[in-house]
Each structure stands twice: as C-alpha cells, then as structure tokens.
Amino acid sequence: MQLKQQESGGGALANQMTMPASKTERAEFTKQSASLPFGQPVALNSISGPTYVTGQLLVQQVAYKLSDKIFSYSPETFDLDVAVKGWSKEEEKNIHGYTTSVVSLQTRTGAGAFALGYIFSNDFDLSKRHVPQTLLAPSLSLRHLRNSLDQLALLYGVASPFVAHVAAADYSANAGFVTEYGTAMQLSEELGLGLVSSSSPYDTQHMSIFATLMAKIIPTLHIYDGVRTSRETVRVIDVLGEVGITEVFNDVSKVADVLNKRLDSAGKIVELLKAFNGELGTDYELFEYSGHEAAETVFVVFGSAESQLAKQVIGHLAAKGVKVGAVSVRVYRPFVEEAFLNVLPESVMNIAVLGQVSDELAVADAAVQSLLYSDVLTSVSFSSKWPSVPRVEDMKYAAAEVFTPTSFASTVLKIATKDNPTGSKLQLPQLENAGQYIFWDVDDSVALCAPAVVGGLLSKDSTNNIYLDESHDNLVQGGVVRTDLRISKNAIDAPYAIEEADVAFVVEEKLLKEVSPSQSVKSGGTLLLKLPNFKEEDIEKRIPSHVRKEIYSKGIELYILDSSSSPAFETDASAARLLVELAFLKVARPGTKHEVMLRLGQMEGNTPTVEECIDELDRSLMKFEIPATWAEEASAPVLPVTLKTNSFVPFEKQESEQDLQISDWQAAAKGLVFKEAYATQTTLRPDQTVKTYTIHVKENRRLTPATYDRNIFHIEFDLGNSGLTYKIGEALGIHADNDPELVEEFINSYGLNADELVLVPTRDGNAFETRTIFQSLVQNIDILGKPPKRFYESLSEFATDELEKKKLASLGAQEGADEFKRRNEVDTVTYVDILEEFKSAHPSFSDLVRIVGPLKRREYSIASAQAVSPNAVALMIVVVDWVDTKGRTRYGQATRYLSGLPVGTAITASVKPSVMKLPTRDDAPLIMAGLGTGLAPFRAFVQYRAMQKAQGKEIGAILLYLGSRHKREEYLYGEEWEAYLDAGVITLLGAAFSRDQPQKIYIQDRMRQTMNNIVKAYITQEGSFYLCGPTWPVPDVTEVLQEAIETEAKMSGRKVDSKKEIDKLKEDGRYVLEVY
C-alpha cells in the first residue's frame, strides 16, 4: 500500500492512498520504518499544516531544508536518516536552492573526523560558510564524537554553523534501549556546547529550527527522546512547510547577525529566543514553569517524557490544591542562572531535581550526583532571592527507568506531601475522553500491521486525532510487539504506555504466558483474544488462571475470535489480517459505519473480501460469559505489562546461507593478483571474530615423569613483535589444528581431493577465504569433534538407505536421546565415525562444511605475568586422553596439538578476559586454591607479587593451597613454590597429595588445618579467595570459608549468616571461582 502525500484538513497521510491496479488481490501493506508516521514514507513538500508526523520525521525535515550536508551516524535499524536519504535521492531542494547531501558514516573511534575534514577543507566553498552543517546521531555515538566536537568548539570562529540532532538512545544489556541524556549533558558542559531539548513531537520542529539558529552563536546539540516520543505517530496541526521554515530561519538569522557583540553567548541566546518567539508567536522560555502559583515544592526536570509528565501530572495535582510546581529545562547549556531563578516562585521551600544518572548503581551511590542537580544547587545556593535558601534534593533516577503518570505522581507526592500513595492508576484529564487500545502480537504475525492500518483508516476522519506507538522485545517468544493506539477529538500528548486500556487485543495466544494483558485493561474494559480451534470446554486450559481471575475481578468483557471453521481465513494471510482489523473495529468502535469498514478494503483494493470478512465475523466473533468460578482462581504471577524495548524492528529469523564454491588454483590466483577487483584481503585467521596474533614456541617441557600416566607439560611462547598483551589472570585462546594424519585418512576414505580449492565464507559471512580441502579440514572444520543432535538430523536428509535415514532421524529426535547420550559420552564418537557408520549418507563437501561445526579455540589460564616476562606467555596443560569402547586411544584435539609442538613453531593465539583479577590493594592477602593445572593463574599471581616485593612495596600475605595425586609425580612448579616460600613471598604453602597416604587428603583438609591463618588473612585483613580447577571441591572449600566466617564472628561476639556473607563476598569480588 502506497500512501500519497497531499495536504488537507486531515493531513498528508490521512487522505489518499494509492489503489492497486487490480482488485483481484488484496495489496500488501508494508511498513518502511517505525520512525515514519504509520510506518509510511512521506513526501517532503507534503509536510505542512495539520498532518500526521513523528518527531524524528520533523527533525529530518528541518535538517534537510536548512543544511548544506547531513552527516548521519544512524545505526542501521534506528532509521534516524531514512527520510532524508529518500529526499536526497529524489534530489529535493533545500532552502538554499540545491540538494542536501546525506553522508552515512559509522560510529567508531575517530568518528566525526570526516565532517571536520569537510568543514575545514581548503577546497570548501566559502560561499556556503554561512550554511549550517548538520549531524544526526543517537546519544550512544556521542562518546566517539567527543574529540571531533572538542576540535570544532576550539575552531568555531572560522567554522560553519554546526548543529547535532541527537536521539537520546543507548543500549543496556539489562533494560534494552534506554533514553540516555547524560552523555549530551556532560559533553555540552565540558566542551562549551549549546544544548536544547524537545519535550514532545509538538515542539520538535520548532526546537530543531531554534537549535540550528543557536548554532550561529555556539555549536549546538538538540536532544530528544530517541526511544519513544520521536517515534510516536501523532497529528500536529501547525507544522511549518518549506515557506514557513524559510521565513522563520531567515528572519531570525538576521537578528542573530546583528546581536550586540558585547553580549556573551548566554545573553545572545536569550535575545535570539525572544526574536524566535516573536516570529512564531510562541512563548518558549529557557526554563518553563507550570503548577501551583504558590508552590512549596518544585521539581526541576530535563528530557522529553520527563518534561511532559511534569507539566501534566503536576498541573493535575496543583489543580487539586497540592502546592507543587515544575520547572522544565528547555535550554540546558548555557545554563542561565538568572532565568532559572526568575521562574521559581518565592514560596518554594524544597526543590527536587529529577536528575538522570547512568544506572541503578549510580542511583544508590551517595557519592554520585546528577549533572542537573549540580547546576540547580549552585544557582540556588548563591542566590539572595529567599530569606531562607530552599532545600535542594537530588532525586536521581536511572536512564533505564520509564515513567508513567502513576509512577511519576507517586514520586511527586512522596516528596511534596510525604504520602506514599497506593491504589488506582492516575488518569489524566486529557485522556478521559480518549479511546485507548493495546495490541499484543508476535513480530512475524500476518496481522502485525493491523494497528497501523486501522490507525491510518481512522486518521482519514479529520475530526479524529490518532496516536500510534509500537515497542519491540526480540528476547521474548522470538519477537513480541506491543502497539498502543489512542483516538481522541483533542490533541494527544501522552509519551507513556497505556495503563488502562478500553480494549486489549491479544492476537497471538502464546503471549498469555509471557505478558499480562489483562492488567492493562481498565475495570469494565474488554479483552479480545484470538483463539483458533476454540472449544468452550477448553477455555480454562487456554487462558491462564491469573488472567481468568483478573477478568472476573475487574468486570472485563471477554471476546473470542476463532475463524478455524472457515479454512480460507486461516490460510489466506491477507484475509486473516483483514478479519483481525474488522474484529477490532466491531469490538472497540461498535459505532463504526458499514461504509467505513468497506473503505478499509478499498484502501487495499479488495472490497469483496471485506464483505466476506464482515459475514465471517458473525460466525467467528463471540462474547464469552464469565463464570462465577473464575473469582476463585490463583493470583497473578509477576509478568510484564509493558515491554523492554530492545529493538526498533522485528527480529530477523531467517539467515541467508551462502553455498561453498569449489574453485581451482587459477581462480585463487586471480583473487590474489587482482585484489581490488575481487575484494581480496590477506589477514591472519579472518574466520575468527577475535583479535588474533602469531606467536612462536619458546619452550615445551613435560612436568611429569615420562613413565607417569598423566602428561602435564609447561609450554612457553615468544611474543616477538606480535603485539599480544595480556593481564594477570587472563586466558590464552589457542587456535589449534586438527591432526593432519587423521584428516588425510578421512580425505582418502571419503573420496575427496585434498588439493582442490574451496571458497569458504568467513564466520561473519562478510567475506570469503580460499583454502584447499585439506587446509579447511585441518584448520577450519571440526571434523574430528563430537557431533551434536542437529548433525544427525541434518545428515539424515542425505541418507539413501531407508534404515539409515530412520536411524539418523531418530538420533536427532527426542526418541533417540538415550542412545545419543551413550554415543556422545561413552563411545565418544566423532563426525568421522558417524560418516563411516552411515555410508549411504554422503554429503558433498559443500554440504559437509555447512552441517559440521567450525573448529573452536580452546582457552587456557595463563601461568605467567607479563610485567615479569614482557615478551613471553606460559601455559600449564594436561594432555586429555582416554580409551574408547572400541579400544582406541583418543586425545583432546588442542592438548595433543600443543604437546607435540617443537620449539620455533608458529601458532595463532588470542586473549580472553577472566574473572581472575588481583585485588586493587597490594597489601590485600591472597588465599588461593588450585587443583592440578588449576595452579596456572596462581603462578602469575605469585610472580607479580614477588616483583612488587623486590621493588620494595608492601605486599599482603599469600596462602597457597595446591592439590594433586602424588608429590613425586605431580608437585607442579614445586621448586618455584618452595623458593617463593623461602623468600617470604608465599606466607603459607598447603600441599595436599591425595594418594600419598592411606587416608586421602584434599585441599579443604589443608585449609581446615590452617583455619587461624585463613581467618586472619581472609576475614580480619579483608583478603580475597580464589579457586581454580574442577568443580567438585567447591562445596567443601566453601564450607571451610563459612567456618572461617563463623569462627571470626564468634571471636568478635556477633552473629552472622555465613551463607549470606559468602554471597556478599562474591559481589565484592573477594570470592572468585574459575572452575570447569
């Protein structure tokens, strides 16, 4: 469906939609971007007057019209530049008479250098020096732009006006996308940049223009909510078109050009804002006050949703007599103290600064202050406006916190009235007469676009104001989408999720187990569920008990949509979606006229289907009478009522696979000779996603006797000029080869040509590497590894023998779980073994590489400190070997590879961080327990502490407990430990050789024998405990540490919960395990 943009009372998007050439098929409605109104592209010349827009669209309109170039740092799915790219491609003109150039750039270290290079280039057209240069970016990119912004600020006197429109959006691993203002606030303060905030889509266009005008004075950042408010589709009645933007910008620019040179930047901006208001007839202020005229408590806020909620919630409370007010900061930098103090009422006694900080840790940390609080406190403390200076409080909140009217009102009332309100949700007056609706669906649903289609239909009525917002959580059910739709006769400015919906429509049944849709339905509202193959007797199996109870307790009406009796509506995606749209209109908007429903089909070219759907609704849509027994159902579990937005687009569930291509030496030669034409790169292990290095074997010696059944060896590498660096406690990743002899045996038995070339896609799929089949099997493909279940399933597709096909399919399914476990854990079969067993399954080499996993690097704890041995790295490794059920001796792939490496051999390695880290205090004691090769990281620890002691530094006590079978064969690095003990580096050496005496002795026994030493080092002197090795001793060792805690507590005359103390020590990094 293509929306045509024509201006009228209903707006560009509300009027006309392009009809398909044929009405025989229902046209496919597709959404181009969530940052566009109803997801549809908009012509530049149609943005004017009353029209449907998003804040992000208006930012792009202003940027395109006023700029010479737009430098975009928009991540691919953010779509901060989707509109300007389209307009530039169509060669739309800016107000300067030419096409604005849009340059897409990547966010990385040194970002911004390209823009600086253009602005200060010797070839720069000086006739354009007065034309603004614009940057579009999310706030997460600002950290990488800092150096460039710093240089720009220093050279701004000879630069073009520069404005950055910044979508406040960053990513948190725990919370998904967060609206993050802190980076912009900090940079503007430190670099002397201007910072202007938009509070909603209704003022975004004006603030975009004003920020661009401010850029004539100082480089300016314009920030706005990049997660929600800038992506809401709303109707704005006073949108400026090209003529309006041109007049405002040119007229106010003339004022800017003649501002008094004696004024500082702050003074100039004050005068500029006056001229801007005069031109537009607006009343924007640097700081905008709302609320009670004699407020005793005033909240100071910064940000889009925060400012709107402050105005609405505090205005509502003030109207009820609560003496509370709010100051919304529109221009944060320069922070004009006089203007701020002027808007504060003289009655104020308490000022609560709602200041954003990075995360919950910063909220809890009393030493962390919000940036806004620092400015407010300074202004108020040095003011003589009040006889008694008002109290200023820092009400910190994490960037991940999302406010609603209810939560915001609760915060306000706690401070203003000392009440702790509970109970019903707050309903603001502006939404009292609005219809509020929620759609829940999965992101691959055929009905995903239904809310946008319905919103587009209802927007065609110029008396309606439609609000549409969607949020994605790609970590639930493979991708869940919640869409909020509001309909009102008044303008809707509601930058928050619907809390009390008139109707909630759950289009995908399985979401009833993931979210709680009934919690967001108001009392007496409606819940509409799409339940295919519905049977009344099964309803309690399909609707969770807590949902049933809430339906009953809140008096919610329940409707069921089930079209399974008409197969056409289950198999035809277009008809199924249309049925969802019509069902919603019938339940949520029962007064919708028949001709309006028909128009829904006309929009997409299939009127007969609409008639059929309307008829089908009578059969498929039913109201379910709620039985009284639902009152006795179980209470609701804790399920989310909103989503953690972690994406702006649906999850891409299908990944394209590129087939391997067999080549020859001539093709490889072409790639090497004509590198540019074939995009050939020569790199070190390009298939690896980590940074790799080439290092050389310096020493390889066995630590255990040759006659002993365990081969534990010390291997040391010369780093040379590889550039490899590592920290104490980190691990070395070894990119080991498969055994060449075994590979050659497989090649011969499988009938492959070892020298044939294969063009293999790299791990990330962005490039290819040319290798022989032999090289691929030695270095790329885990052909000698253990096959997972999916290999059997994939291999069954290639079997030509029916019995083998069934056997393989069974091993890949649940029914063959026991046999698969035996093969994997007892027989320890490899891919080669399976291919030899099932000979009728003979995939081509290309298919073989696709279904066999890649070789993985193996990681080993580093047994050296680079500060002590700058050009070397050491490992201690045990060769893994066993005899399988067929009597064959098998070896671990990487340990066998390493044990046989001669001195001078080059290998590929990488470094992996670890939890094993030394305490920050040099004098903090170390209590270390290592079993077998688990001693490796502790050798590095002791080496480093010995170096510190030699340098004259005071080091803490070192208690080293080691465990192995026999002292004569496995006293690993024993001579070194004894020497360190004699030198006073190691304080206590507790060696447990379990099999050297009739009664087995383990490290926990040695620890218990030296309990007083542990109490002193671990508890009294606040040392750190480390355990490295197998998992089995963890409970016993932990029990000893708990005894130590309890012993010290008893000596001190206090009671403790030793388990909780261990948990606390874990959090503090003083109880560290690296077990396997």
Image (spheres, grey):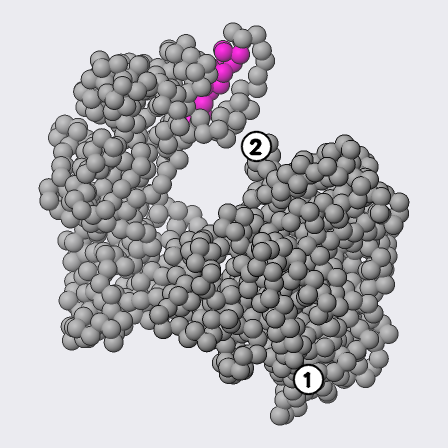
Q: Nearer the viewer, mark 1 or mark 2?
A: 2
Badge 2 marks a residue whose secondary structure is loop
Residue extending farthest bottom: 21
Range drawn in magenta? 1034-1049
Residue extending farthest left: 903
Dominant secondary structure of the magenta stretch? helix
Does the magenta segment cover residue 1047? yes
Mark 1 packing: few (<14 Cα in 10 Å), some, or many (20+)? many
- Which residue occupies the foreground of this view, 853 or 794? 853
Q: Residue at (50%, 47%) from the top-left corner?
A: 190
How far from the left and from the top, in percent, is residue 1039? Answer: 46, 20
How far from the left and from the top, in percent, is residue 741? Answer: 15, 53
Badge 1 marks a residue whose secondary structure is loop
Q: Residue at (24%, 35%) from the top-left corner?
A: 866
Q: Residue at (25%, 45%) from the top-left corner?
A: 724
Question: Residue beneath label 2, please?
Answer: 367
Q: Where is residue 646, by image quadrant?
A: bottom right
How far from the left and from the top, in percent, is residue 870? Answer: 21, 36
- Which residue occupies the foreground of this view, 838 or 503? 503
Q: Where is residue 589, by image quadrant?
A: bottom right
- Residue 661 in view (yes/no): yes
Q: Quadrant of the C terminus?
A: top left
- Residue 560 in view (yes/no): no
Q: Residue at (48%, 28%) from the top-left corner?
A: 1068
Question: Residue beneath label 1, please?
Answer: 6
Residue type, label 1: Gln
**In the rendered image of this protein, does residue 807 appear above or below residue 66?**
above
**In the rendered image of this protein, does residue 542 appear above or below residue 9?**
above
Tell which circle, 1 or 2, labels the residue nearer the N-terminal end: 1
Does the magenta segment cover residue 173? no
Distance (Cα) linking label 1 and label 2: 56 Å
